[in-house]
Amino acid sequence: MTVIKQGFQDLVQDLGRNGYTHVGISPTGAADKVSMRIANLFLGNQVNDAVLEITLFGGTYLFDMPTTICLSGSHFTATIRGDDVPFNKPVTIQKRDILSIGGSTSGARCYLAIQNGFSVTDLLGSSSTHLMSKTGGFRGRNLQKEDQLAYNEPEKRYFPIDRKFPIDHNRSIIRATPGLQHSLFDKPTQELFFSKEYTVSHQSNRMGIRIHGPKIQKRTPEDIITEGLPLGAVQVTGNGDSIITFVDHQTTGGYPKIANVIAADMHKVGQLRPGDVFTFELITMDKAETYYLAQEQILK
Amino acid sequence: MDQETFRPPTILPASDRSIMIQFNQEISEYIHQQVHFYSTLLLETHEDKISNLSPAYSSILIRLKEGISIWRTIAKLKQFFNENHEIKVTDRTRIKIPVCYEGGFAPDLARVSAHTGLSIKQIIHKHTTGKYLIYFLGFSPGFPYVGGMDPNLETPRLESPRTSVPAGSVAIGGKQTGIYPIQSPGGWNIIGRTPLNLFSWNQAKTPALPMGASIEFYSITDQEFHDNQESLF
């Protein structure tokens, strides 16, 4: 697949590079793994097959051999030969077809899956791009004009077309459990945190989603001893702003964590775009696990 | 290690997909030995449950594999710590790291000097006479959290971090000293650079600067820096 026009940030991603945080390598992987998995499921792919993650606006891509693709995630304008491309449906691609992806009409990201996945050099068992260390994926960076991204040979296959995935995509409410250091914040502060609206900052990226809302202060000024960072941890920085720990996060950190986005809502975080407004909803750890296991069932 | 004094760690959920194992919340070699021993053992024995593990100064964060239940795993981990309370301490790997504390390799040496009131000569002397321990790796690929710096060298981090710090940079951030094994963003005061190649993606599982190793720095000249561009591998 040749890139004719570059998108805002097209990255090769899969489910992530696991097993290396103890040597400082963060897992990375698709920002919205639910949509990434759905795109692969519609093609009958392996769940971990490499996809293209397209953020805010896409590019134009020329296909060099026939295959089948599927777009999933937030809806972006997309055309082939002047026709709109449906989302969540296998789409047949002829040789020399040109796919043009425009801007998003909803959240931050969509996923372009291709039959049997995109093909890049494996790095520690994963195809994911890690931007900070400029490694993995396609040359450790986003796709640029004239890049040629290889994809695997398709074979004849029947596609599961009528599948439905009843997933909650409402990103105005993000559910969270209490963070490891929630007790460093007094009760009124915790209530403030879970009652007010937050706006997603333009300074957000795959390492962290920076959010503006009420200034959150902990009871004592001391920092905590640096410790491992869970995905989705809401870290409260010195100036009272908060950061949601995201897929390319540093493996360890020293800011206190007031809350943690639940696993079943991490795909919503991957769809947050600058300017989005949302609230956190506090739920118990038990409920969070129930929602996670239910979501896994849907994505089987 | 004395079994009588070993207190099993606190084990609690950190999120609905991760578990925090907290030892005594202090930065000490004694606690480090526990963290090091158990993180190695957990990686060996719980590969089926653990997707990722992050040891730190006094804790281990476990990120669970898909479908593994958090409460059942916490119960099993409590049992694991009851059954494995004898800590074996292994000999430390000793690593000597050449550092050039000159010119362009040390852009923040003057800042450290202004803050500490020490001359550049004194800073280099204090930094090279220290015996350091790698508590754990974190932040970025291969980045060692190093303890043991002379408190007189303590210098606050930069107001705004650099977007790019060259690989091999040796730096001071607050009470800590460290080395950037790969080029990355960073907010610490850069006081020198080593010509050694300290991180290789091909050998990510056996980092050049591993957890639990003790390191020492020695000063080299600009000429020696260029003559010694090699790798620890």
Image (cartoon, coloured by chain):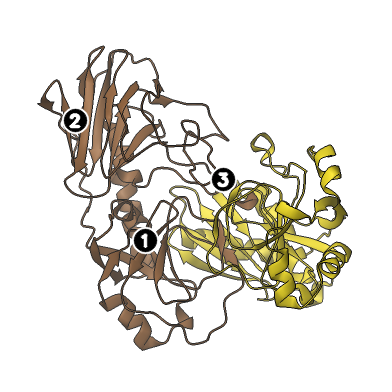
User: What label does residue B48 carry, if any?
Assistant: 3
The chain shown in yellow is which? B
Look at 69% across and 42% down and name the residue there: B199
Q: Are marks 2 and 1 on the same chain?
A: yes
Give the foreground label among 3 and 2: 2
Residue B156 higher or lower than A269, as above or below: below
Q: Which amino acid does label 1 sit on?
A: Ile
Tell me the subunit letter for badge 1. Answer: A
Q: Which amino acid does label 3 sit on?
A: Asp
Chain A colour as displayed: brown
User: What label does residue A262 carry, if any?
Assistant: 1
**Res. B85 in view:** no
Measure the alpha-carbon separation of dots 2 and 1: 28 Å
Look at 48% across and 82% down and name the residue there: A184
Binning the other alpha carbons within 10 Å of mark 1 as few (below 14), some (14 to 19) or many (20 upward) gives many
* Number of numbered callouts drawn: 3
Q: Nearer the viewer, residue A174 or A288?
A: A174
Q: Position of residue B39 (x, y in %)?
A: 68, 56
Measure the alpha-carbon separation of dots 3 and 2: 35 Å
Give the image quarter of residue B177: bottom right
Give the foreground label among 1 and 3: 1
Residue B188 higher or lower than A216, as above or below: above
Residue matched to label 2: A89
**Which secondary structure, mark 3?**
loop
